[in-house]
Amino acid sequence: MNDSSFSEKPLLMSDDWEIPEYEPRILQSKTSTYCIVTAAWNEGDKCVNQYLRMAPYSSEIDFIVVNRGEELISLDESFLTRKLCIRNLLQVNEPGQSSAYRTGLAFAMARGYEGVIMIDSNGKDDVSAIPSFVHNLENGYDLVQGSRFMRGGFHENTPLYRIIAIRIVAATILWLGCKYWYSDQNNGFKGFSRKFLLDHRILPFRKAFRSHNLQVYLNYAAAKHGFTIIQVPTSRVYPSEGQLASKIQSVGQHIRHLGDYIEISMGKHNPKE
């Protein structure tokens, strides 16, 4: 389909998808079967530096960025395409990480991609793992989950309370719901097949997913419905002491995120029959 067809919303986007309003900028034509979707949310120079590190992989995978801050929207188009290798820039005003990823994933499905890789835009992840994600999607896996805690993975400056929360508390709650043990389900470096995202039992493009619950739900749903899953080693380095390690900071935010795990594992976000 010619790119002019996507001057507004992609024509193949389903009417029953609940997607936030967004303004798409089609900067370059589609060239790959797979794409990376990132959400740029007031990350400053960190996200620009990450796209510069990702640029060498643009020959094998397309980049789609969902932007809510001012980091990218004000940049020169030549810089966006030549230096950062961004193909599509979606400007979204609705708050929430999951709202951003609902938009990006739906856009990717409407563009016909066979698989999507999600990665945070805060510069913590080692992007050299991108080919591993592409390889596993090409080989038929429906969910490729990055893990800093498995053999071959690496992490640095991870707060102790986060290690306990990720490896023991959240992992146990999720296992109780889907009977699959993830070693690093909180890691935002994930890949999904088209078959999985468009399955009628999953329905990820719903308004129920707004803040940080979509990624949790996708891990739960993939295991619950028997999709093929593989965990791959990745590297994740947090900032040095004194800098924010995550956007989830307050006690209330942590409690709400834990509540997301409990609700999802109890099936409260399962599609209605």
Image (cartoon, grey):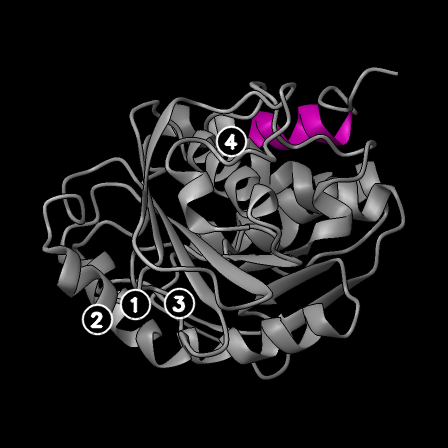
Q: Position of residue 49 (x, y in %)?
A: 20, 67
Say which of marks 2 and 4 sits in front.
2
Q: CA distance from mark 2 to mark 4?
A: 38 Å
Residue 150: in sight, yes or no? no
The kind of residue tagged 2 is Arg
> Sequence order check: which comes first, mark 3 or mark 4?
3
Q: Helix or strand or loop: what does disc 1 sit on?
A: loop
Q: Residue at x 41, y 78 (%)?
A: 57
In the displayed structure, 58 sits above or below 14; it is below
Q: Residue at x 62, y 40 (%)?
A: 216
- Residue highlighted by disc 4: 257
- Residue highlighted by disc 2: 82
In the displayed structure, 115 sits above or below 262; it is below
Nearer to me, 38 or 266:
38
In the drawing, what numbered circle is on residue 125? 3
The kind of residue tagged 1 is Cys
In the figure, is residue 267 to the left or right of 137? right
Nearer to me, 109 or 50:
109
**Dots 1, 2 in contact, CB < 8 A:** yes
Say which of marks 4 and 1 sits in front.
1
Q: CA distance from mark 4 to mark 1?
A: 33 Å
**Dots 3, 4 in contact, CB < 8 A:** no
The kind of residue tagged 3 is Asp
Which quadrant of the view contains residue 207? Answer: top right
Crowding around mark 1 (Cα neighbors within 10 Å: few <14, some 14 to 19, many 20+) is many
Would you say the magenta stretch is mainly helix, strand or loop?
helix
- Residue highlighted by disc 1: 85
Q: CA distance from mark 1 to mark 3?
A: 18 Å
In the figure, is residue 224 to the left or right of 149? right
Say which of marks 1 and 3 sits in front.
1
Magenta stretch contains residue 206: no
